Image (cartoon, rainbow, N blue to C red):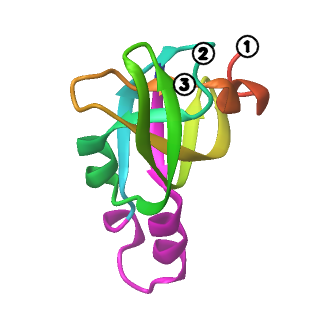
């Protein structure tokens, strides 16, 4: 599923700035998988860094390889199929595709 992620903080800062606002908004286009076993929007750490998302906390997650402590970052706006939701982001390994978890689905973003 194709979508776009925007760093909400940079978008708010750009709206209040007098300079060329669109130059300061951090966003990225993604190709993501919908995963019913995932709670958050999961992005590879390099993409989180590219977007400049702020670290919020660490969360224990259960994975197929066992439990892991993963970072939670925020806040991002996810735009998919003409709809938006504001969500926190969980980091995933650099070699993984982005995953849309149930937070995106329960916000009515994807059917």
Residue 1 position within the rendered picture, expressed as x and y whole percent measured from the top left: 48, 15
In the image, is residue 21 part of the stretch drawn in magenta? yes
Residue corresponding to mark 3:
100
Say what secondary structure mark 3 lies in: strand
Residue 95 position within the rendered picture, expressed as x and y whole percent measured from the top left: 21, 24
Q: Is residue 58 above or below residue 18?
A: above
Toward the bottom, the furthest residue is 18
* Residue range (magenta): 3-24
Quadrant in the rendering for residue 34: top right
Disc marking residue 37: 2
Between 1 and 41, the one nearer to me in the picture: 41
Earlier-in-chain disc, 3 versus 2: 2
> How many residues crowd mark 1 within 10 Å: few (<14), some (14–19), many (20+)?
few
Q: Are marks 1 and 3 in contact (CB under 8 Å)?
A: no
Q: Residue at x 78, y 28 (%)?
A: 106
Quadrant where the image shows the C terminus: top right
As measured in the structure, the alpha-carbon distance from the residue carrying label 1 to the one carrying label 3 is 12 Å
As measured in the structure, the alpha-carbon distance from the residue carrying label 3 to the one carrying label 2 is 10 Å
* Mark 2 or 1, closer to the camera: 2
* Mark 3 or 2, closer to the camera: 2
Q: Residue at x 66, y 30 (%)?
A: 104
Disc marking residue 22: none
Residue corresponding to mark 1:
111
Q: Are marks 2 and 1 in contact (CB under 8 Å)?
A: no
């Amino acid at each position: 599923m194709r979508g776009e992620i925007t760093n909400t903080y940079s978008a708010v800062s750009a709206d209040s700035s007098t300079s060329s606002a669109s130059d300061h908004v951090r966003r990225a286009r993604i190709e993501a998988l919908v995963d019913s076993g995932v709670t958050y929007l999961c992005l590879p750490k390099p993409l989180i860094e590219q977007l400049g998302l702020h670290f919020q906390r660490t969360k224990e997650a259960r994975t197929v390889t066992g439990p892991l402590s993963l970072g939670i970052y925020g806040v991002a706006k996810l735009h998919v199929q003409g709809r938006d939701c504001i969500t926190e982001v969980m980091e995933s390994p650099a070699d993984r595709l982005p995953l849309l978890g149930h937070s995106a689905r329960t916000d009515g973003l994807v059917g």
